[in-house]
Image (cartoon, grey):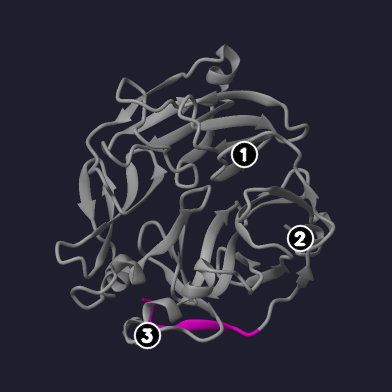
Amino acid sequence: MAFEKIAYIDKFPLTSSLSNEKAINWNVIGMKKFRIYDSLLVVSTTDRDGFWSFYNINDLSFKGKFIKAGQGPNEFSMAPDIRTSRFYTEDNMLFIDIYDFQTGKIYKMNANQSLRKNELDMSIKKDSLPSFIFDFAVIKDNLYYCREINKDQTQQIRYLRFNGKKEIPNTFKILNQAFVEKGEDFNLLSTITKESPKGDRIVEAPIYLHQINIYSSDGKWGKTICVGKADDIGDLEDKISWTRIYTHGGVCTYDKFFGVLFVNEDIRTMQTKRKTLPTIQLFTWDGKPLAELKLNRFVSTFDIDLTNGYLYALDIEDVLYKYDIRNILDKIKI
């Protein structure tokens, strides 16, 4: 599952072992994922009275919680994916486009008004998308990246949906060729996918393959990079499931670069007792390596506060830690 030419990466210009982290001392129960946007830290939890909680990133003061569980208007049966939701500024206001996996609807949340009134300000933006899309991203208004499983559950089909019409660009067709044998686990094809803030690039980090695919959202450009040896789907199928390597565990995107959480642990060890400490790999949007950050904890998700120069990381015990990476960001000139 790669483009024709693979750019192999032997080493990073900068490698740094992170330490001296500070645990965030707050009372957040059921934390699952989080996002940092400007001065806000938005946390996804299991709280059915408000799946998303908003905090000020500077002093961690609580600002409000929204998106309730239920079947009524503006309610969700399960917490929407905060990582695939689109955060953007429009007319000096923060908006969030949220996809409801079960209904196929996209909601537009006015975060500023919601926080000001302490009441959810949200409306339906689009109600005609397919439900249960395997992977999804809002590129820009009326342009959506989608990925669905075919009827045989042997392939994952990427496509763009623009003004209600379905289109499969050439780079998408190349990646769509990857398949597993019928009856095999289709998650061997799964990737963690994220669009750039500008919407012009998409990055896919497979969860069982070492290679990473970067391509333009218009389908005219694509590149595969790989730290280590590239994997073949057929070789993975031949392995006993619990010996397969879980490679990538998260992707975060920024204006000038993106970061990937590299796990590098076999499935059996992941499910019993972890041994290999993960790293965060930073790349430019052209696929050039920037830095490798070696973590001292078993982290499940992360994000970077670029304004203040801190890396936030949630470990497998659901404790949020804060690392000072200002010196690293200065060195890579980001």
Mark 1 crowdedness (10 Å alpha carbons): few <14, some 14-19, many ≥20:
some
Where is 192 relative to 40, above or below?
below
Q: Residue furthest top?
A: 117
* Labelled pair 2, 3 in contact (Cβ < 8 Å): no
Numbered disc 2: secondary structure = loop
Q: CA distance from mark 2 to mark 3?
A: 42 Å
212 or 234, nearer to the observer:
234
| Amino acid at the residue labelled 2 | Lys
Q: Earlier in the sequence, mark 1 or mark 3?
A: 1
289 or 207, nearer to the observer:
207
Residue 305 at least partly seen: no
Q: Quadrant of residue 257?
A: bottom right
| Amino acid at the residue labelled 1 | Tyr
Q: Which residue corresponds to mark 1? A: 37
Q: Residue at x 37, y 30 (%)?
A: 107
Q: Residue at x 32, y 39 (%)?
A: 142
Q: Earlier in the sequence, mark 2 or mark 3?
A: 3
Q: Residue at x 52, y 32 (%)?
A: 52
Percent coordinates x, y for residue 42 in the rendering: 59, 36
Report if residue 4 lies within the magenta region: yes
Percent coordinates x, y for residue 239 in the rendering: 37, 85
Residue 67 placement, left or right of 124: right
Q: Residue furthest front?
A: 272
Q: Quadrant of residue 25?
A: top right
Segment colored magenta: 1-10
Q: Main secondary structure of the magenta part?
A: loop
Q: Which residue corresponds to mark 3? A: 239
Foreground disc of the pair 1, 3: 3
Percent coordinates x, y for residue 204 in the rendering: 45, 64
Q: Which residue corresponds to mark 2? A: 333
| Amino acid at the residue labelled 3 | Lys
* Labelled pair 2, 1 in contact (Cβ < 8 Å): no
